[in-house]
Amino acid sequence: MITPTNGLVITEDTTLAPGVYFLPNGITIASDNLTLDGNGAVLVGQKQQGCGLTLFNQKQVTVKNLGLQGYYHGIYANRCDFLTITGCTIRHTGEIRANTIFLDIWRPADKPYGGAIYLRDVRNSTLSQNDLQHQMNGLLSYHCRQLRVVENNASYNSGFGFHLYETSDSLFQDNVADYCCRYEPRGEKKGHLGADAAAFLLVYGSSRNLFRRNLARLSGDGFFLAGLPPEADQVVGCDFNEFEENDASYSPNIGFEATFSRRNVYRNNTANFCNYGFWLGFSREFILEDNEIRRNHSAGVAVENGFGMQVRRNRFYQNRHGVLLWSRFVQQFSRVVPENDTSRAWLIEANQFIGNEKAIRIAANQDHGTAPLSPGTPATPKPFSHVIRLNDIQKSQIGVDLHKVINTVLEGNRWVGNGRNVVEKE
């Protein structure tokens, strides 16, 4: 057992003496195949600068039971393999003051925000049972592969609970990231609640990840996937991800957002009491099945210019719109994703719609699916080839609302107590 000193370099199995230590330069692990047991010791930095624990190019290292606070990054790991971080408590890392800026979700690895744990080019590693609450960001992962992130708590952060930037082939299970939110003022009485804060953020091709049984409630967005960087001329989608049994309820914005991405699967999730339960604009070939989608202010599922989607066996209760699909012309997007020129080829099957104002609305040339576009906006092709079958549609003002669409198939649906079952406008 040793007493940690400022700038300590660790090269063998080490257990720290319990206590609180002011170490503005932190400590460094400089060898492979070792364990650092913090043993409850707390390392304290100065003015949210520097790193509490640094690892570079290490393998087979375990860090456990360590407390860190007051650094820009609590743990900084670059080019490490088979790293384990478990049972650590990290607080008060680098943070941009709340109620100020709208966040930049595209910040690269060499200009990161502060956070509890920063991983860059880390492979085959495990983060478990860490407490990453009450700062700006919990986990920042850049260019990582095969992470196992389980039973961590990154709640009450003003940025991102768990951040993935080109991070793929990983498991995120049984984590909590509630109330990851912030506010951006926009004048004396206006502002944006959320400001792109999110419980889980995925950008730049973060793909083939599995998210299971995570809590992401009351966050700016619950799960936010973005596939088109600003000013980009090509999509870098977050594709082939699976979301199972997660809860992203109570977002002031969107429970599950995924734009410019493909073939993600959402199964047995909960998206209640948000503005939008799911927003999947300009995406394709998603599967949504067996989700609970209840009392969302604008829509349960909202998709602009999406195609090839399957929506099956979901429960839509008391939303303004259950499923809201529409087309809109956007010049930049028409160049980048010309195939996403309208809404088409959807299967909406065996869902239960109860008490929604409109169970299903499909419309051409709309703003957010409900309002006309500005005069002079070019028209898109009409939405087409939607199959709506075997759904239970009850107690809606309008069951199915079709606005300038073609080749819609309605078959085998059950209609009970609706104001009007079907409305069509050419």
Image: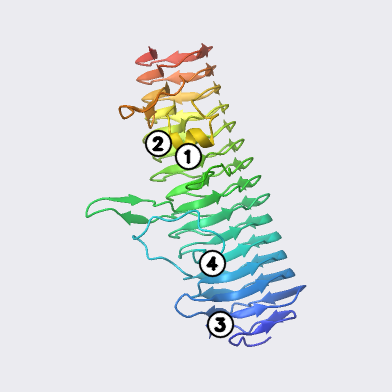
* Amino acid type, residue under disc 1 in the picture: Ala
Query: Up-down: is 279 above or below 37?
Result: above
Q: Residue 422 at what x, y percent from top left? A: 40, 13
Residue most extreme to the left: 188
Q: Which numbered disc, 2 or 4, marks the residue closer to the eye?
A: 4
Mark 2 touches mark 1? (CB < 8 Å): yes
In the picture of the structure, the residue carrying the numbered disc 3 is: 25
Label located before the other in sequence (3 or 2)? 3
Q: Badge 1 local density, few (<14 within 10 Å), some, or many (20+)?
A: many
Could you tell whether 15 is left or right of 299 in the image? right
Mark 3 touches mark 2? (CB < 8 Å): no
- Can you tell which mark lies on residue 296? 2
Residue at x-position 63% and y-position 88%: 3
* Amino acid type, residue under disc 2 in the picture: Asn
Closer to the camera in the image, 384 or 29: 384
Mark 1, secondary structure of its residue = loop
Residue at x-position 53% and y-position 43%: 233
Q: What's the distance in space between the residues labelled 2 and 4, CA to CA?
A: 33 Å
Label located before the other in sequence (2 or 1)? 1
Residue 170 in view in this figure: yes
In the picture of the structure, the residue carrying the numbered disc 1 is: 271
